[in-house]
Image (tube, rainbow, N blue to C red):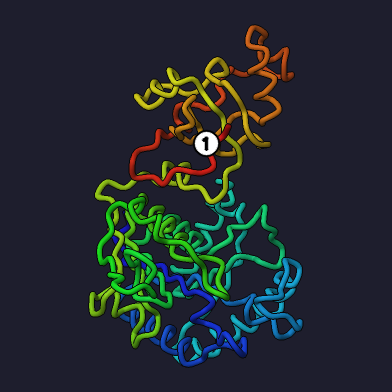
Amino acid sequence: MTSVKRVVVKIGSSLLTDQVRLTPRWAFMQRVVEDIALLRSEGYEVILCSSGAVALGMKMIGVTPATAGLHDKQAAAACGMPLLLGAYKQIGHEHDLNIAQILVTLGDFEDHPRFLNTKNTLHRLLAAGVLPIINENDTITTEEIRVGDNDRLAAKVAQMVQAQHLVILTGVDGLYDRNPSEPGAVLVETVHDVSQYLSVTEGVSTLGSGGMLTKMQAANMAQNAGCTTLIANGEADDPISSVLKGLRRCTTCVAHAEPATSWAAWLTDRLQMAGSIVVSSRAADEIAAGGRGIDRNDVISINGSYVKGDVLHVYDETGAERARGMTDFSSEETAILVRNIDLPVKQLIGYHSRAVLIQVDNLISLDDRHILWEPKPA
């Protein structure tokens, strides 16, 4: 892990946008930027993952959160992005903060070369003392190719830059043991095993695309990379630094003491399932024991359409997810190889290669600290 004090901050649309007028909440943004300036003066490097562009642009195209469809939201994002960045730049100028905007898509996290390119850009901005503000490029994304929520996006950024802390500012004090509107709801102050709380995390806000479930998923990703997640109410003075310094209550999702390597974290913490395969239970057990990859003799069935370099989810015959790994073959090539085990690879797909679908160095066996994916393949 890096020795630099580095924090990623995620702010949702409901905090940044007046939900009735669909305009920036200037006083809140002023508190956030002023607090970031304070943290930077104390030696922190800060990256901000900010929602709000879609909500801010809705009035310009004449829609509301209740009536907006996909194309409306894409157009609203195009209108709202300059408004959001302009607000940050105006306030940042008061605190001698230079602002940069980075718009990302799902592929910038799931494709490893693009992941590294984005990482290099962020490191260069931090080295120059610039505050990166990251948002999903909602003007071009569709349901099939989008991250979908800035909670998990922020966790991937935290993993990317090896941040020590991920601070998620929301409209409540943190994670509760039930719906916080119910009588007797108790704040969960410390979380080690995120999976214990998934059943109490349903529901999303009016403006936002994520609820407490995505925050728990994000916390799990951050934990695996050695990053502690703090979920707190954003409606406070010094909203970020007060949480980092333990001055107000929040939910702390504690980082794992032995974090995964950057490569292992990238392989295992996925934002979207590109495809999956089912292998024999014998092969799954041997994979879990380590020391071997997956060859065509192990495969029972193939699910989804994927290309070489995609990360596949690996299930056993009982439907349990056992591993994730980067494939050396497309789904079409895999199907041909699996159906014709007795024929050489070159004869089947036109070039010479070993019949190893996923190399051992590109395969990570899952342990209990990972949230497993649903639905499982049939």
Residue in view at x 40 percent, y 80 percent: 234
**Residue type marked 1:** His
Q: Looking at the rendering, in which quadrant would you find the C terminus?
A: top right
Within the image, what quadrant is residue 163 found in? bottom left
Q: Looking at the rendering, in which quadrant would you find the N terminus?
A: bottom left
Could you say where residue 5 lies in the image, as x and y percent from the top left? 31, 67
Whether residue 123 is visible here, answered yes or no, is no
Residue in view at x 27 percent, y 54 percent: 192
**In the foreground, 112 or 76:** 76
Left or right of 231, for residue 374 = right
Q: Residues within 10 Å of mark 1 (few under 14, many from 20)?
A: many
**Residue at mark 1:** 313
Residue in view at x 43 percent, y 55 percent: 217
Left or right of 110, for residue 162 = left
Within the image, what quadrant is residue 69 found in? bottom right
Could you say where residue 154 lies in the image, as x and y percent from the top left? 47, 63
Could you say where residue 201 lies in the image, as x and y percent from the top left? 42, 61
**In the foreground, 114 or 170:** 170
Outermost residue, front side: 183
Vertically, is 350 above or below 188? above
Vertically, is 26 above or below 46? below
Within the image, what quadrant is residue 289 found in? top left
Could you say where residue 374 lies in the image, as x and y percent from the top left? 51, 44
Number of numbered discs on residues: 1
Vertically, is 326 above or below 202? above
Whether residue 230 is visible here, answered yes or no, is yes
Secondary structure of the residue carrying numbered label 1: strand
